[in-house]
Every structure is written in C-alpha cells, then in structure tokens.
C-alpha cells in the first residue's frame, strides 16, 4: 500500500540543505586530516554524510521530494 506524501515548505527544504552543508563543512577538515583518504574518497564520505542528513529530513517530513533538489546543490559545493 502506498503512503501519501505531505506538502513540505521551502523553509524545511532550505533547513535540510543548510544543516547538511554546515555539517559536512564542519567535518571536512577533521576527516581530511584524521584519515588517509584521498580527495575522491573524502568527497564520497562527505556526500554520504550529507545524503543521510537530507534523507532524514525527507523521511521525517514524509516527502521524498525534499531529496530531489539536493542532487543539484551538493555537486557545486563539492566541486
């Protein structure tokens, strides 16, 4: 059976992206210096962290559309 998604405000979407970007910006220097990961592996780890955060917002708001614009925003930051 299919669950209906709820309407999510733009503020909630912005909050999800802000929390994700602030989190990975805070973690990036520690991750880079405390591990022997190369730049691609570090980027993958940061992407996984941000994805988990946005997914949590999406899950909590019962709307997977929170997740959609994320794929346009994160590559710009990681680049």
Image (cartoon, helix red, strand yellow):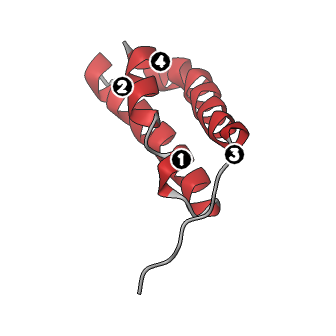
Which circle, 1 or 4, is nearer the viewer? 1
If you read the primary sequence from the N terminus, does the residue marked by circle 2 or circle 1 appear first?
2
Q: Tell me the CA gap for discs 2 and 1.
A: 22 Å
Residue occupying image coordinates x 69% and y 45%: 9
Q: Which mark is residue 9?
A: 3
Circle 4: element type? helix
Q: Quadrant of the C terminus?
A: top left
Circle 3: element type? loop
Circle 2: element type? helix
Q: Which mark is residue 74?
A: none
Q: Which mark is residue 33?
A: 4
Where does the image place residue 2, in percent across and percent down from the top left? 43, 80
Image position of 10 (left or right of 71): right
Q: Tell me the CA gap for discs 4 and 2.
A: 13 Å
Residues 26 and 16: in front is 16
Mark 1 surroundings within 10 Å by alpha-carbon count, few (fewer than 14), some (14 through 19), many (20 or more): many
If you read the primary sequence from the N terminus, does the residue marked by circle 2 or circle 3 appear first?
3
Which residue carries the number 2 mark?
Answer: 43
Q: Tell me the CA gap for discs 1 and 4.
A: 32 Å
Which circle, 4 or 2, is nearer the viewer? 2
If you read the primary sequence from the N terminus, does the residue marked by circle 3 or circle 1 appear first?
3
Q: Tell me the CA gap for discs 3 and 4.
A: 37 Å
Q: Which mark is residue 66?
A: 1
Which circle, 3 or 1, is nearer the viewer? 3
If you read the primary sequence from the N terminus, does the residue marked by circle 3 or circle 4 appear first?
3
Residue placed farthest to the top in the image? 79
Which circle, 3 or 4, is nearer the viewer? 3
Residue occupying image coordinates x 48% and y 56%: 64
């Amino acid at each position: 059976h299919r669950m209906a998604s709820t309407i999510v405000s733009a503020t909630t979407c912005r909050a999800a992206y802000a929390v994700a970007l602030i989190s990975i910006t805070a973690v990036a220097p520690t991750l880079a210096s405390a591990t022997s990961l190369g730049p691609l592996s570090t980027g993958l780890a940061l992407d996984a962290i941000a994805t988990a955060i946005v997914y949590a917002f999406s899950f909590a708001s019962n709307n997977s559309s929170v997740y959609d614009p994320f794929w346009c925003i994160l590559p710009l930051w990681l680049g």
